[in-house]
């Protein structure tokens, strides 16, 4: 069983597609039809999309997109790690300042 998109291109299990509404892309896991049309399940979102809103992607375009997303995720993970390190440093400084003794044994302001 295959489904056709708005350009009458055949979509089948294993095809690479992009949802035109959001740009989400993935591999076709399943196909089904009902009274509202032909539906395609995409692996990356695990959602069913109406086939008329999908466009076929060639393998090269799909792998280029996935490579870009992978680099973006790696960069985001690195930024998150840096943010967490900075947060821990700030918390440590706060704790150190909390423990400072401000009793009268310290020097007075002057005068």
Image (cartoon, helix red, strand yellow):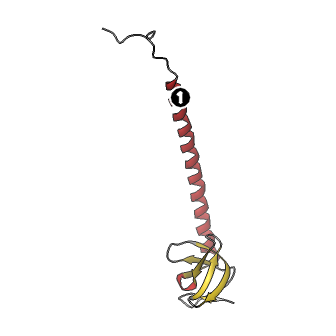
Q: Quadrant of residue 27?
A: bottom right
Q: Secondary structure at mark 1?
A: helix
Measured along the vertical axis of the image, is residue 90 above or below residue 103? below
Q: Provide residue 36's location: percent of width, then percent of height.
A: 56, 89
Q: Quadrant of residue 14?
A: bottom right
Q: Quick check: can you spot residue 64? A: yes
Q: Which residue is mark 1?
A: 95
Measured along the vertical axis of the image, is residue 29 above or below residue 73? below
Q: Provide residue 101's location: percent of width, then percent of height.
A: 49, 17
Quarter the C terminus occupies: top left
Quarter the N terminus occupies: bottom right
Residue 99 or residue 29, whichever sits in front: 99
* Residue at the image point whose x is 60% and y is 68% from the top: 64
Q: Quick check: can you spot residue 11? A: no
Residue 66 or residue 93, whichever sits in front: 93
Q: Provide residue 86's location: percent of width, then percent of height.
A: 53, 39
Measured along the vertical axis of the image, is residue 29 above or below residue 66? below
* Residue at the image point whose x is 50% and y is 72% from the top: 22
* Residue at the image point whose x is 50% and y is 30% from the top: 94
Residues packed near mark 1 inside 10 Å, few (<14), some (14 to 19) or many (20 plus):
few
In this view, which residue lies farthest toward the left?
Answer: 111
* Residue at the image point whose x is 53% and y is 28% from the top: 95
Q: Provide residue 8's location: percent of width, then percent of height.
A: 57, 91
Q: How many marks?
A: 1
Measured along the vertical axis of the image, is residue 73 above or below residue 95? below
């Amino acid at each position: 069983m295959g489904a056709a998109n708005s350009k009458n291109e055949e979509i089948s299990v294993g095809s690479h597609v992009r949802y035109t509404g959001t740009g989400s892309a993935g591999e076709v896991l399943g196909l089904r039809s009902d009274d509202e049309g032909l539906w395609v399940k995409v692996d990356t979102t695990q959602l069913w999309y109406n086939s008329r809103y999908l466009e076929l992607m060639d393998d090269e375009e799909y792998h280029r997109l996935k490579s870009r997303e992978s680099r973006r995720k790696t960069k985001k993970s690195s930024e998150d790690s840096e943010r967490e390190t900075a947060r821990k440093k700030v918390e440590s400084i706060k704790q150190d300042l909390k423990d400072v003794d401000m009793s009268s044994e310290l020097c007075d302001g002057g005068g």
